Image: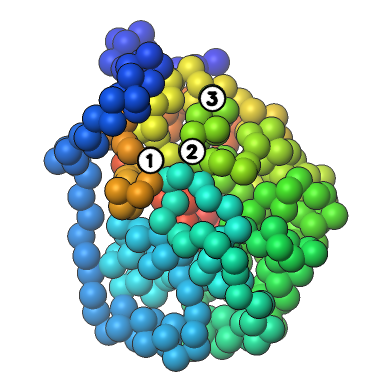
Amino acid sequence: MPIMSQSAASSYRPLPVLAERASAQAGSPTPRHPGWIKTRFSQNERFDFLRGILREKGLHTVCEEAQCPNIGECWAHGTATFMLLGDTCTRGCSFCAVGKGKPLPVDAQEPEHVAETVSALGLDYVVLTSVDRDDLPDEGAGHFAETIRAIRRRLPECRVEALVPDFNGREELIAVVADAPLLVYAHNLETVPRLYRRVRQGSDYRRSLGCLGAAKRARPSLLTKSSLMLGLGESREELLGVFRDLREQGCDILTLGQYLRPTHDQVEVFRYVPPGEFAELKAEAMALGFQHVVSSPMARSSYHAWEVHEK
């Protein structure tokens, strides 16, 4: 049962659907960032070392490609989310700044290069993600699994989180990654079902939701994780419905963050959600049984991911 008080619930006022549609049709400008939307850029020796070694190995990070606002904090901490399989995606989600088009051939040396970098940095928690590769027979599942194994061969104690595409719902490909020696299998729903056509072109809510359930079936002990962007026009009731759907699939970890428009080519922000509402939504999610919830305006799917094994 929800634990939000009546007064707190009444303060949650997402943009009405009709107003959302009117704004989109009128092409009204994105609202200005409120005071709580800020991040501190940190650059130190670890930041410079990580940037240098990534360039040397020809590796990509979603931190750079998706223009993540937390790049300074995470890189200075010595943590990065490695983006496998190139920097060109075969889909065209309207919220994402990663390039779209025809990808280059897969670099067969990438798993070892990532493992070498992780070893050089001495990381104990690594996040791997990728562009969508619908052009490949296995959609990149085998490449994920090989990268995870390469990391664990060099650093057996290193925890690995894989933030994967939907693999078009193919359970045999989901199992390829789930069976690898990783700690967390993550797939982001990103938004509520009603907004999929506008925000996640080429994806399907039920298919994405089913991926998390398939990972649990493949390996019941595996932690599963998903993330949602807020401020796209969703309602509180829609969010709670997604929370319940995730729990029905056995999802363990949830991240909630404010959507920020990377460039003018992406979908606009419709609402900036105050920090207090993020706290209320975290309480709602925890009451539904999630093991761990990260919920704040600047949170992203991989933000402070290393805290999971500490908790």
Q: Which residue is depicted at the point 42% across and 70% down?
A: 79
The residue to which callout 2 is attached is 199
The residue to which callout 3 is attached is 194
Figure check: 85 above or below 279: below
**Amino acid beneath label 3:** Arg
Using a 10 Å C-alpha cutoff, classify the residue at mark 1 as few (fewer than 14 neighbours), some (14 to 19) or many (20 or more). Answer: many
Using a 10 Å C-alpha cutoff, classify the residue at mark 3 as few (fewer than 14 neighbours), some (14 to 19) or many (20 or more). Answer: few
**Residue 67, percent from left and from top:** 35, 60
* For residue 134, side relative to residue 13 (left or right): right
Callout 1 touching callout 3 (CB < 8 Å): no
The residue to which callout 1 is attached is 267
Q: In the figure, residue 280 lies in which quadrant? A: top left
- Real-space CA distance between mark 2 and mark 1, rounded to the nearest whole angstrom: 7 Å
**Amino acid beneath label 1:** Val
Whether residue 289 is visible: yes
Mark on residue 118? none
Figure check: 266 above or below 304: above
Kindly report which numbered mark, 1 or 3, lies closer to the viewer in this rendering: 1
**Residue 152, percent from left and from top:** 67, 78
The N terminus lies in quadrant: top right
**Residue 33, percent from left and from top:** 19, 41
Q: Which residue is depicted at the point 51% across and 47% down?
A: 93
